[in-house]
Image (cartoon, rainbow, N blue to C red):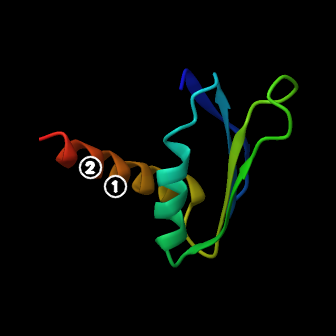
Amino acid sequence: MDSFYIAEKTDKSVKIGFKGTDTTLVNPIMDELDRDSDVKIVRYINIHPELKDPALFVETYEKDPVDVVVAAAERVSEYFSAINQ
């Protein structure tokens, strides 16, 4: 993945866009988000790769959605780091 950016943000939702074509790590992060009881909705949006960047949409009940995504990404990173040892 080349880069990511916050496309939209409210108190309870965030849409994170991805530049580049490699979004392989989005699936494990989505799995982690699905396990979080504070996550109301998690969706991967890929309308058309040549017209819009793919995005991850997350809506929470209470927590800051960016904090929730960061925590999920850290858990995925820890998991893959442990596998490589």
* Residue, disc 1: 75
Are the residues flagged by discs 2 and 1 in contact, CB closer than 8 Å? yes
* Residue, disc 2: 78
Instruction: Name the residue nearer the viewer: 59 or 21.
Output: 21
**Residue type for callout 2:** Glu
The x and y percentages for residue 26 are 55, 45
The residue at the point 85 percent across, 40 percent down is 47
Q: Is residue 76 left or right of residue 31?
A: left
Q: Which residue is situated farthest in the bottom direction here? A: 37
Task: Give the structural element (helix, strand or loop) at label 1.
Answer: helix
Task: Give the distance between the C-alpha atoms of the residues marked 2 and 1, in whole angstroms.
Answer: 5 Å
Instruction: Name the residue nearer the viewer: 3 or 66.
Output: 3
Q: Is residue 41 above or below residue 43?
A: below
Q: How many marks?
A: 2
The residue at the point 57 percent across, 28 percent down is 22
Q: Is residue 49 left or right of residue 20?
A: right
The residue at the point 56 percent across, 61 percent down is 64
Q: Is residue 85 above or below residue 22?
A: below
- Give the quadrant of residue 41: bottom right
- Circle 1 packing at 10 Å, graded few (<14), some (14-19), many (20+), is some
The residue at the point 11 percent across, 41 percent down is 85
